[in-house]
Amino acid sequence: MALRKIVTVGDPILTKKCRPVVRFDEKLHTLLDDMADTLLEANGVGLAAPQVGILRRVVIIDTGEENGIVELINPKLIETDGEQTGCEGCLSVPGEYGIVTRPMTAKVEAQDRYGDWFEMEGEELMARAICHELDHLDGHIYTEIAERMLTPEELDKIAAGDEE
């Protein structure tokens, strides 16, 4: 396994639509494993393949829950419900956070690393992460839908635990 370089805002790859995965081979497994190592090292919640320079429909998410890292290949959002508004950041937009409204629950259909289809549903942080990462696959970044970006002073308050 290896760490991959995380592409940051301004790189045109982040604005491109990703192509479906058609080969479920060792190359894909290496990408998934490398993305997991990169996500862990960056202390993030999710990572999409274009964030490491690969235009394929591949996402990994780790919300810290007992199910560990979730791998979603060729994911399709099939159902959402409710609404949540909260702070959101992105490994490709380092040091910045914004207020974003996302669904409270999100159901996705995807393939695993071997090509088998499955469905999963996430709530709260998992739903937010699913929607955030799937946006990357279509060339979108959360800053496009943020109601507003947080100021450095607001970030300092959040870091200090003084949230209102």
Image (cartoon, grey):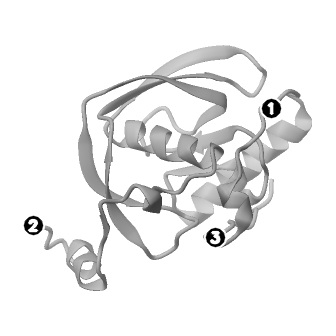
Q: Quadrant of residue 24?
A: top right
Q: Quadrant of residue 83?
A: top left
Indicate which label's residue lies in the foreground, 1 or 2: 1
Neighbor class of circle 3 (other Cα within 10 Å; few <14, some 14-19, many 20+) is some
According to the picture, the residue beneath numbered tag 2 turns out to be 164
Task: Give the quarter of the figure containing the C terminus.
Answer: bottom left
When the figure is inspected, residue 142 is found, relative to residue 135, above or below; the finding is below
Viewer can see residue 61: no
Q: Is residue 49 left or right of residue 120?
A: right
**Residue at x 56% of width, y 52% of height:** 140
Residue type (three-letter) at the residue carrying disc 3: Thr
Residue type (three-letter) at the residue carrying disc 2: Glu
**Residue at x 39% of width, y 43% of height:** 128
Q: Is residue 24 left or right of residue 87?
A: right
Observer-nearest residue: 18 or 130?
A: 18
Neighbor class of circle 1 (other Cα within 10 Å; few <14, some 14-19, many 20+) is some
Neighbor class of circle 2 (other Cα within 10 Å; few <14, some 14-19, many 20+) is few
**Residue at x 36% of width, y 59% of height:** 146
Q: Residue furthest bottom?
A: 153
According to the picture, the residue beneath numbered tag 1 turns out to be 21
Q: Quadrant of residue 37?
A: bottom right
**Residue at x 78% of width, y 22% of height:** 114
Q: Which mark is residue 103?
A: none
* SS class, disc 1: loop
According to the picture, the residue beneath numbered tag 3 turns out to be 8
